[in-house]
């Protein structure tokens, strides 16, 4: 079954949170595994032409991650965070922060919820809670939507080629 799954971002004015919603034509276990397994993340989480590598990948409650994206022009940025919950296949709760920001402490609390849908499909809902409305607005204005559309399409292809 192929559907035209769309990425939807909801960011209400004046709020510190945003919601990202996307459906996948794959079972919940498979989508959860894609977001909780570093070896699988490496296959879809960077847009084409961008290289991703893990500096740390301890995907368990109390664990942490640290990865670097290297752009085609050689510039790079690193993100890191900590895992607060890994409830397979329902939910991941983690933090997310960019390394090297002029001011530390702008971590985002990120809650990924995986819901089963009829027909072996899955709805992923990501709730990002930012430190301030300004941080949330900067995230939305950073071009994150176009990047998410690309990585979710890459995940679609990966899930399609995987055995469920």
Image (spheres, grey):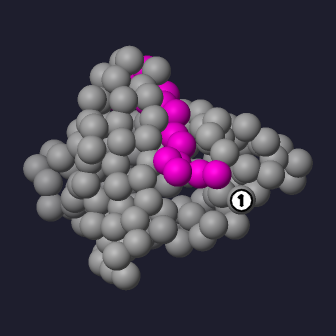
Q: Which SS class for mark 1?
A: helix
- Relative to 74, residue 132 above or below: above
In the displayed structure, does residue 92 sit left or right of residue 133? left
Q: Nearer the viewer, residue 80 or 129?
A: 80
Category of crowding for the residue at label 1, using alpha-carbon neighbours closer than 10 angstroms: few (below 14), some (14–19), many (at least 20): few
The secondary structure making up most of the magenta span is: strand
Q: Nearer the viewer, residue 33 or 69?
A: 69
Find residue 129 and report its image quarter.
Answer: top right
Q: Which residue is mark 1?
A: 138
Q: Magenta segment: does it hold 60?
A: no
- Examine the rendering and report whether any part of residue 99 can be seen: yes
Residue 67, percent across and down?
Answer: 34, 49
- The residue shown at (54%, 43%) is 97
- Name the outermost residue toward the left: 163
- The residue shown at (27%, 38%) is 56
Name the quarter where the N terminus is drawn. bottom left
Find residue 29 and report its image quarter.
Answer: top left
- The residue shown at (66%, 57%) is 139
Residue 111, percent across and down?
Answer: 54, 33
Q: Which residues are magenta?
A: 85-102
Name the quarter where the C terminus is drawn. top left
């Amino acid at each position: 079954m192929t559907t035209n799954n769309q990425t939807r971002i909801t960011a209400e004015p004046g709020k510190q949170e945003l919601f990202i919603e996307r459906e996948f034509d794959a079972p919940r276990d498979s989508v959860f595994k894609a977001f909780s397994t570093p070896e699988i993340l490496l296959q879809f989480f960077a847009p084409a032409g961008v290289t991703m590598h893990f500096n740390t990948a301890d995907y368990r409650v109390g664990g942490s991650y640290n990865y670097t994206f290297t752009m085609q022009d050689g510039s790079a940025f690193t993100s890191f965070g900590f895992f607060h919950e890994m409830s397979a296949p329902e939910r991941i709760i983690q933090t997310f922060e960019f390394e090297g920001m002029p001011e530390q402490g702008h971590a985002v609390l990120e809650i990924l919820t995986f819901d089963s849908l009829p027909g072996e499909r899955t709805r992923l809902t990501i709730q990002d809670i930012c430190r301030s409305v300004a941080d949330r607005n900067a995230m939305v204005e950073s071009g994150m939507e176009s990047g998410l559309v690309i990585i979710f399409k890459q995940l679609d292809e990966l899930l399609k080629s995987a055995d469920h």
